[in-house]
Amino acid sequence: MSFKRYGASQIGEWIDNNVRQAKYLHDLAVQDPDFEPASAPPMSAICIRYKASGLSEADSRRLHAEVAERIEQSGRFWISTTELKEKSWFRINPVNFRTRREHMEELFALLRAQCRDVERAKTELQV
């Protein structure tokens, strides 16, 4: 139905835009010393991780899961986690044709804030 209504050209533009958004999120992660991307995204799916110093991989796995849950509960974005290279990662797949750069900026700011909040709470519990 979508192809009949919008045509392959329009749908192709939407897909290209989603790939651009994933690449932009990749660039944001590269520029932040607390994050790393798994790789440059060839499609609209991207995996990035928070790489705070001093976190064990088990703690990192819990942090990523808690942050993904918090973000989902906010109702603003839906992301998931995955395991790659024996590490936990956020898996983000911007597929809405309305997604813009400012959405990626908002998501990345939210990821950064939530990761730091969860990490800070863990540190306070240890003291």
Image: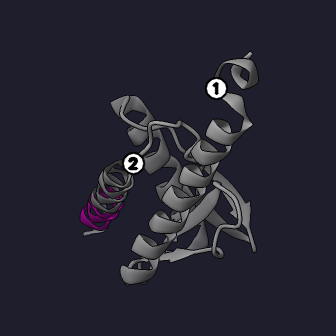
Magenta span contains residue 121: yes
Task: Specify start and end residues of the magenta stretch as a single range.
Answer: 115-124
Q: Main secondary structure of the magenta part?
A: helix
Name the amino acid, label 1: Tyr
Look at the image and tell me in which quarter the C terminus lies: bottom left
Q: Residue 46: image x %, image y %?
A: 61, 61
In the depicted structure, whether residue 89 falls above or below residue 98: below
Q: CA distance from mark 1 to mark 2?
A: 19 Å
Instruction: Say which quarter of the image contains residue 98.
Output: top left
Q: Is residue 51 visible?
A: no
Depth-wise, is mark 1 or mark 2 nearer the camera? Answer: 1
Instruction: Say which quarter of the image contains residue 120.
Output: bottom left
Q: Residue 126: image x %, image y %?
A: 31, 67
User: Nearest the camera: 77 or 66?
Assistant: 77
The residue pinned by badge 1 equals 6
In the depicted structure, whether residue 100 falls above or below residue 86: above
Q: Earlier in the sequence, mark 1 or mark 2?
A: 1
Residue lying at 34% horizontally and 64% vertically, measured from the top left: 119
Q: Residue 113: image x %, image y %?
A: 27, 58
Residue lying at 72% horizontally and 61% vertically, measured from the top left: 83
Q: How many marks?
A: 2
Residue lying at 34% horizontally and 32% vertically, measured from the top left: 74
Which disc, if any, is residue 100?
2
Q: Which secondary structure lies at badge 1?
A: helix
